[in-house]
Image (cartoon, helix red, strand yellow):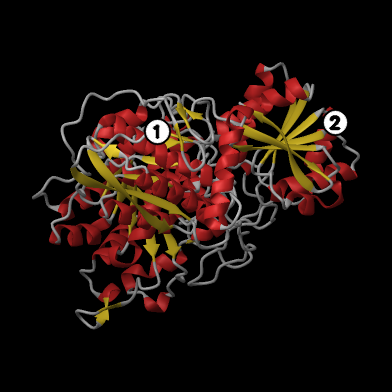
Amino acid sequence: MNRAIFISYRREESLASARAVYERLRSEFGAESVFIDLEGLDYGVDFVEVLEQQLAHCKVMLALIGPRWLGIDPSRGSRRIDDENDFVRIELRTALERKIRVVPVLVDGAAMPASRDLPDDLKALVRRQALELDFRRFDSDVGRLIGTLRKILDAAEPGGAPAAPAHDDASDKRSSATSSAPVSQPTEGHALAPARSGSKEAPASMGQEQRPVGSARKGNPPPAASSDSNHSKGSDAVSPPVGRSPERNLHRLKTGLVVIGGLAALAVAIGLGGGRRPSPTGITSAPAPAVAPVRDEPTRGLGGDVKPPVPATGTPGVVVRIGHVAPTSGAIAKLGRDSENGARMAIDELNANAVAIGGRTATFELLVEDDAADLKQGLAAAQRLIDSRVNGVVGHLNSGTSIPASKLYFDAGIPQISPSATNSRYTRQGFGTAFRVIADDWQLGASLGAYVVNSLKSKSIHIVDDRTAYGQGIGDAFRAGAEAAGGRMVGREFTSDRATEFTATVSAIKATNPDIVFIGGMDTVAGPLIRQMRQQSIRAKVVGGDGICTSELPKLAGGGLSSREVICAEAGGVTDTRAKAMDDFRSSYKRKFGSDVQIYAPYAYDAVNVMVAAMVAAGSADPKKYLSALASTQGYKGVTDTISFDEKGDLKNGAATVYTYNAGRREPLAVIR
């Protein structure tokens, strides 16, 4: 049976929001199920007829409503929604008449229109349960939406299977988390705020008619529908390194179709001669020689080993533009500036060394963008770099921005190397342009599991995860690594990323008396859970990934954080063989910028140099010509590690650093792989 999700929106006010929602639905339901704007239509077709056909198979419509959704049309001096030929009105009217489930999605702070503000044929819209889409908690909100969509599509298919648990993406763990508002019953013209975990009052399913006040459905939301807080990990329920399993969506998505843009988008695009954006041509040099492996004989640079400059031949030079994207404003701006500084060091060094590409002296330019760790701004920043025809991109810092932006770079044919995005899904989307120079979440979790069993001599392990994609994924990876090393799972509990009370969980842990309690989630869950465990005299060591490995954990755990009883790990780490190069880099960085390295500067530095080394090897800065050389990088001696990419673009044998807490301060224990 054909099943469709139709996204209705006003292109002039909600394009960025629609694109962000589309990217999430595409990643959940598969690229083969996605139709966006005009890319799937041949020229000359009747777009109204095509969309009428899609509405015929539509099972649910998402109506994106922005602050100007009802607004004045400047060309007429009247409200667009009052025009019977307004395409958005036609879409919604048709859906309501056909009894299609309509879910209002309020974006950019918009309020639900009141009945008095709508034409008669749309007044039924106000009775539909709405979703407030706040980009500070984008992944949580869209995760709830995806869970609802699965239920709708399952119910629409005769004999359909029960909906699978919803696993949603997350933006960077290093972003500041935003807790959701308490549940309140909606009145006309208002959306229902997200439910707080553990609340007795749960909202009605989105898109259903709202019940009168006091008659809301009772019961907690199912744990499987929980989603990540606004942090970087967890954009996918992390699967083993071979990639995500397709089984959980296959029975729902054989013929699914996501339609985005609607009649209004098509009309605007056709009027403008829309179509696919041309890919950048890059910088073309003399005919490129056969791609050679990246050479290994280094010369000393500002902070470590870099490739030797190729002597120029006196031919005209070439300008190479490399983009860098990171949050240089907002809560984690210091990390974004740190990464940008690392990229700038590499650019300055390359220019000083007069590197030549294809026999032509290259001048390197760094084009910087601030995405504020925000999905919408990340997509906009990526598009600006594409429009600037950059030869490559280093970034983004956060997984939550790197993953959606990677589709834009892939479509444009531009290589992207993230110095810091660790979510496993980033390189598991089938995009041959995505690379990273840091270990991913699966590598971290599995290696940490083996370390706990082999080094701490701990055998019995109880896992608690918050049912977010990150928490469940790293828990699965930890279990795989621990069991392979001889560890034994004695129990697994599930909570939510907003939970603060863990009586039942603590009781279950106490009953198994484990050596280790692994917490898959964030410090906001780990801190209260550790405190309550200690109150019940549970002395097992606590282990977690980089979600709990923060300076805030001692404060969140209260008096429960005893010295050396908590072990955590972060991606990245320098072994003894690279210690001298890293020390040199840190010294050079401080001389240049007057401050210490935060975290990611050396990784951004390596990313730039690896990219340029591939250009040198290919004899061209044209992305089409050097991409294969970049993908075949093996044994590049960087500041952070010896860099080799696997077939997905991941760093082979990536490192992670294990930490413990002593007297409330974090201190390193080991570097593991």
Measured from the top left, where is residue 588 in percent x and y? 54, 47
Q: Residue sitting at 47 percent across and 43 percent down?
A: 605
Residue 145 visible in image: no
* Element carrying mark 1: loop
* CB under 8 Å between discs 2 and 1: no
Instruction: Reply above or below: 622 against 325.
Output: above
> Which image quarter is the N terminus in?
top left
Three-letter residue code for mark 2: Ala
Does residue 577 appear to the left or right of 272 in the view shown? right
Question: Which numbered dot is residue 307?
Answer: 1
Does residue 138 appear to the left or right of 552 in the view shown? left
Q: Residue sitting at 78 percent across and 23 percent down?
A: 460
Measured from the top left, where is residue 285 in percent x and y? 18, 39
Residue reaching furthest bottom?
Answer: 77
Q: Nearer the viewer, residue 559 or 387?
A: 387
Q: Residue sitting at 35 percent across and 38 percent down?
A: 612
Nearer the observer: mark 2 or 1; the answer is: 1
Q: Nearer the viewer, residue 552 or 14?
A: 552
Q: CA distance from mark 2 to mark 1?
A: 57 Å
Residue reaching furthest right?
Answer: 537
Q: Nearer the viewer, residue 252 or 307?
A: 307
* Element carrying mark 2: helix
Residue 192 visible in image: yes
Q: Quadrant of residue 435?
A: top left
Measured from the top left, where is residue 355 in percent x and y? 32, 40
Task: State the residue position of label 2.
Answer: 511
